[in-house]
Image (cartoon, rainbow, N blue to C red):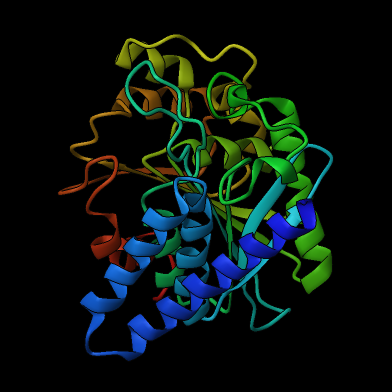
Amino acid sequence: MLVYFNCIVKNLYNLIQYIIRMIHKSPNKSFFFSLVYAVLLLTGCTSLLITQNALSDAKMEQRGFIRKNLKGPLFSLCSYVRFGDGASPVHVYIEGDGKAFLSRTRISPNPTPTSSLVRDLACLDPAMNVIYLARPCQYTAKKDNPGWDRNYWTTKRFAPEVVSEMNNALSFLKEDYGFSELHLFGYSGGAAIAVLIAAERKDVIKLITIAGNLDHDAVNRFNKVPLLSGSLNPVDHASMISHIPQFHFIGENDEIIPHAAIDHFSVASDPTAEIQVISVPGCTHHKGWQSQWPTLLVSAGYLS
């Protein structure tokens, strides 16, 4: 029965991939989008993750990325890699919290993002080597994650074991591809993970955060939601990465991350730290980043 089910899943994934390829080739795109919708209706909600994976894989493959699932003791982490030159540093984009909640108090059954924001930013980066790294339980099935637990996209989203598995995934990719230096880019909760990983490594030479959650106690108090028990707080590790040049971009109209949280992180860093905090006009927490990303890369010392 399991073999039969796996065969159905694989065939469904291949069917959706085929339809997506036809969407890109055909002038009658509405027909093929309707076909994807029909497949979803016929196969039910269990096909949602399969469809999300197929759409994500097709989009990233079009832009030169290949998917690699990185299996650890607790999680199978989804990554996309565009590799061109082992002698060049790699830019690592770490996903945000995804769809952690369905509403303010209702926890999502699956944290896979519904937005392509972080993948878009990775695709817009012209660096020779770029990696997109998803967070635990995103873009992967429950059966592939021994540690599957909704606490890992809520109260324990920055737990030591999460940081360890994501850090180990980067070490595996580093060994597999042969690059030597990392530039870490983290969005929202991914910024917290980027800080915590940087504090554990000696090969991170620049840190860029976008709408970063750099003090989750301050962020949760601002949003009047419970504090994250079981999670490390990046602000407590600020002084450990003061030697790394940092750019922290925060949307001028960010409704989720208060500017004070970024200020707390800067104050907690050593006075000699090379830190720039840049407020970005026209950006909220979720919107406006893609159109400004090439300009912001220049601000951070790239593309010049």
Question: Considering depth in this image, is 172 or 115 the residue closer to the camera?
Answer: 115
| Residue 129 place in picture, x, y as percent | 61, 74
Residue found at x 47% / y 21%: 216
Tally of numbered discs: 0
Residue found at x 65% / y 26%: 149
Residue 270 can be seen, yes or no: yes
Question: Considering depth in this image, is 154 or 302 the residue closer to the camera?
Answer: 154
Question: Considering depth in this image, is 88 or 24 the residue closer to the camera?
Answer: 24
Q: List the single residue furthest toward the left.
A: 282
| Residue 150 place in picture, x, y as percent | 58, 25
Q: Is residue 226 above or below residue 134?
A: above
Query: Could you say which quadrant of the image residue 39 lies in?
Result: bottom left
In this image, 165 relative to 258: left or right? right
Question: Considering depth in this image, is 143 or 82 the residue closer to the camera?
Answer: 143
| Residue 42 place in picture, x, y as percent | 41, 57
In this image, 258 relative to 1: left or right? left
Query: Could you say which quadrant of the image residue 213 lies in?
Result: top left
Q: Is residue 201 above or below residue 107?
A: below
Q: Is residue 220 above or below residue 271?
A: above
Residue found at x 34% / y 81%: 23
Quadrant placement of the C terminus: bottom left
Residue 63 can be seen, yes or no: no
In this image, 170 relative to 135: left or right? right
Query: Could you say which quadrant of the image residue 252 lies in?
Result: top left
| Residue 134 place in picture, x, y as percent | 58, 50
Residue found at x 56% / y 18%: 155
